[in-house]
Amino acid sequence: MAPAPVLELDSVTGGYGETEILHGVSLAVKAGEIVAIIGPNGAGKSTALKAVFGLLSLSRGQVRLDGADITNTAPEQVVRRGVCYVPQSENIFPTLTVQENLEMGAYVRRDDFRPRLHEVYELLPELAERRRQRAGTLSGGQRQMVAIGKALMLEPKILLLDEPTAGLAPKFRHEIFQTIQGINRSGTPVLMVEQNARFALTIADRGYVLVDGSNRIDDSGPGLLANREVAQMFLGGGWADG
Amino acid sequence: MDQAYGIFLYVISLLTVGGIYAVLALGLNIQWGFTGLFNAGIAGFFAVGAYVSAILTTGPSEHHLGGLDLPIATGLAAAMLASGLVAWGIGRICIRLRSDYLAIATLGIAEILRLIFKNETWATNGARGISLIPKPFEHLPEPWNQLAFMGLVLATVALLYVLLEQARRAPWGRVMAAIRENEAAARAAGKDVDRLRVQAFVIGSMLMGLGGALMAHYLKFIDPNAAEPLTATFLVWVMLIAGGSANNRGAILGALLIWTIWSATEILTTRLPDELAIRTAYVRVFLIGLTLQIVLQRFPSGILPERRMTAAAQRDQPPKPAAQRDAAA
Amino acid sequence: MIEFLNFHLIPGVVLGSIYALGAIGVSLTFGILRFANFAHGETMTLGAYFTLTLILVTGWHPLAVLPAAMALTASVVLGIDRLFYRPLRQSPVIILLIASFGMMLMVRSVIQFGWGVQLRSLRPGMIQQPYVLFDTLRISPKHVLIIASALVLMVLMHLLLTRTRIGKAMRAMADSPELARLTGIETEKVILVTWIVGACLATAAGVFLALDTHIETLMGFKVLLPLFASAILGGIGSAYGAMVGGLVIGVAEELSTYPWIGEGPLLAPGYKAGVAFAIMVAMLILRPSGLFRGRVF
């Protein structure tokens, strides 16, 4: 019997208070994978991530981590179970230094975090150079690195990224995607929401297309890239972005 | 018989002072209930109105400005004008401030005003205050003088109530409600939100000035610490909140109710031996404060204007988790 | 020049140190709990009165009883948070504002009830000869005490914020409470530490103010405006901003009465409170984030 996926959303339905945004969304991330969630604006992509992190009220469905039910668990607990989430905005502590941001990332660790700190610096060398710099003074791309590095400090079972390249210049987007691949190669599965759908699919093992809060298509990364319907959906949308 | 008469006079005074506080509460309601502005400096506008009317209506004195002997009606009108002007100045500068900052700013203004009234002794006789302020109807025999004054105050309250209810239903009131519901939409629709807010601030402050003037004439005396400023400001807030905010009727009822409780407890404490009496004053303040905390915890949404959150309150809310702020992607 | 230093600059630094200590608590509460704590002045007053009682009971030096006074004050503050602020954690900020406004009066009434309202001296009968430096500088021992103690406390504060896990968590939460929560930081614990630190510093500020002037039940309220001004000037949420802001406001207040032009003071002493207010309003209009770019709301 195949091991349970690292993360599973099973027919998840819910939203903020009374507004239902997700209507029975299902997806899974298996060990070692990069999975992308793509779709038009308002499709509920980011909301799907927040569902994992207990930031929504789910009326139906289950969220499972390594087979265990973590539906509607509070964010503080979800972190401690090994799920790290990098929000789209406000994802670093601007007045803290790069190193202090990473230290905060390790807050729930009870052991010595310094070995992990070295590892993260190796994965993200640009951060090592600027470890004493206030995070708020960094460029957009570097800040995104700090946000990701912070999430990595816990050696999470899975990394959730919400639009990691949002608002970044193309050069930095490329860098971020390479970083994500590097992280994945070192053993961390990644679930990411991306507006730059085409770019995301080139590094993703699999992808899910969400439209209006429901699953539309899911396939392998290359499969989706070649899919005519998907291409049409994004004409003038994310597809146009490089 | 004497005791009944005493109680009769007491009730008249309750209604009179309660009525004056109702005027203050109605003014605060315009600022808070209609518009969502947190004014922590009610005492300042109160004092401006009181002093202006006092100075204009008193006879000549070597201790303070005066000698104009103007009719009381003029004094009252001037009081409203003066508070309105001060409010306009402050509003122009501070109206865009978030509620914490507006509260601090208005508190500061009230304190500065108090210092002015205390230090500029050439005008105000400083801490010794202005006395011999003329009182309407004071030439009538008792109890008619008291009754007439009470009638004046209650008539004012009634008139203001009618006017404010009209305003609430009129286009002006509807625009204010629209701003409360959705400030962004109102701005987009071309409404000059800041100017309207300043208007509300000014009108509310004018009422507070009127209240101050009425009190000055009632007591025939005013000094910088009349009605210990902070307690006065606080009492009006409790009155509005206890009465049910954003509600003109609630403002009036709250004022009468809280004032009666406040005054009655004072009577009780004067019956105690001196040493204890002083201390129970503090107990009263404590209990009113405690009552407020209980109301805040039990009926938080009842406190908020129109039982919905004003746009200003929404803006000032502790930011929801980033999750809820970015709408569905 | 001598007059300038002895009667204006040095008192300004003393006052500024007091403001700095008080403002740190205000700034941190503002930044982490998101509301202006109107009752903070009263915390200072309470701390001073606890110290007074401890001195009367033990006969020791104020600094010796200060830790105990801090512990007492912090306990009261924690109790207040538990009973009156924690239930309102999720409420709109305006509600908290009203609650703290009410709290201000409640605490003051308790102090007035317990200790009475007459002016008192923290160390009655204490007459001190000023130290004379360089034949011109005259500085009284109590001022040396205040400035030195304030410096020590500020250094300790700095160490807390930069060398300890909880201190960094405090700064993180001041930056972004939502992200702190997502990062797994125990927000309630940080809040408790914030209250404790604020209360301890406020106690010290209250004691130093009492040493410098006298003890009376309105002393905290009277400095509330300068405290807010200092916090806003320095940038909400930044302890360092509060330190700098406090010093600036204190010095500005004392310098305002110096005869800069002509014979009389530039500003009548009765209006010193206006200086802090004017600076604060100017700051809010020109640069609301403050000198150290704290939060803008």
Image (cartoon, grey):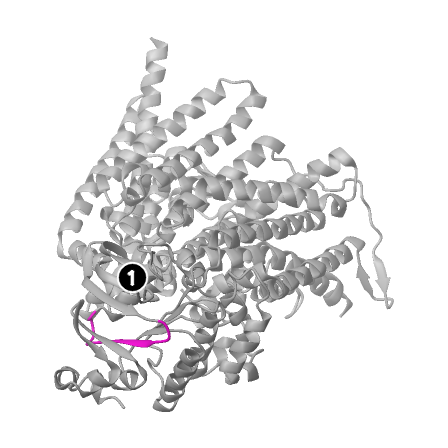
Stretch of the chain drawn in magenta: A31-43
For the N terminus of chain B, give its image quadrant. Answer: top left
Residue A181 visible? The answer is yes
Residue A76 is left or right of residue B29, and the answer is right
Tell me: residue C57, above or below residue A90. above
State how many labels appear.
1
Tell me: residue B156, above or below residue A68. above
Q: Residue shown at 54%/43% (left/top)?
A: C78
Q: Residue shown at 33%/38% (left/top)?
A: B298
Residue B184 is left or right of residue B124, and the answer is left
- Report the chain holding disc 1: A
- Tell me where residue A10 appears, x and y as whole percent: 24, 61
Closer-to-camera residue (B122/A48): A48
Name which quarter of the figure residue A170 lies in.
bottom left
Tell me: residue C22, above or below residue B21. below
Label 1 sits on what residue type?
A: Ala
Closer-to-camera residue (B227/C90): C90
Residue, disc 1: A51
